[in-house]
Amino acid sequence: MTKFQQKVYGALKRIPRGRVTTYGLLAKEVGCGSARAVGQALKHNPDAPTVPCHRVIRSDLTLGGYSGSESGADIRRKVRLLKQEGVAFEGGRLANPKQLFRFGA
């Protein structure tokens, strides 16, 4: 595991159950200018869902990917994990924007 991945996974652990953040907000938190780099780190998370990469969504508040997929069984699993935590999506977007977690806020 790289130092960058360690930083990303450490920040992920601070996102409370029932909340989500965006790839961009997570990138900013770890001092990275690239939401895509964060996405790549999440894609290789060896400890999902214990290290909750399912709690990261796109900045437009849509679901985004999971385990390197944007459809199929992996996305259904992400939806199921979030639903178990009380996070719902309506019309493809986060139903309650108040569930968006901003680091340091």
Image (tube, rainbow, N blue to C red):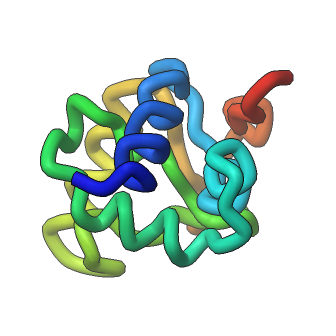
- Which quarter of the picture shows residue 93? bottom right
Residue at (47% x, 42% y) in the render: 7
Q: In which quarter of the image is residue 75?
A: bottom left
- Residue 29 lies, with reference to residue 39, above or below; the image says above
Q: Residue furthest right?
A: 105
Q: Position of residue 46 (x, y in %)?
A: 14, 49
Q: In front: 48, or 62?
A: 48
Residue 43 screen position, x and y as percent: 29, 66
26 horizontally vs 74: left or right: right
Q: In this view, does 14 lie above or below 29?
A: above
Question: Is 68 on the left or on the right of 21, as rendered?
Answer: left
41 or 84: nearer the viewer: 41
Q: Can you say whether 6 is above or below 93 in the image?
A: above
Q: Nearer the viewer, residue 26 or 7?
A: 7
Q: Can residue 35 be seen in this view?
A: yes
Say which residue appears at 70% left-offset and 52% top-offset: 31
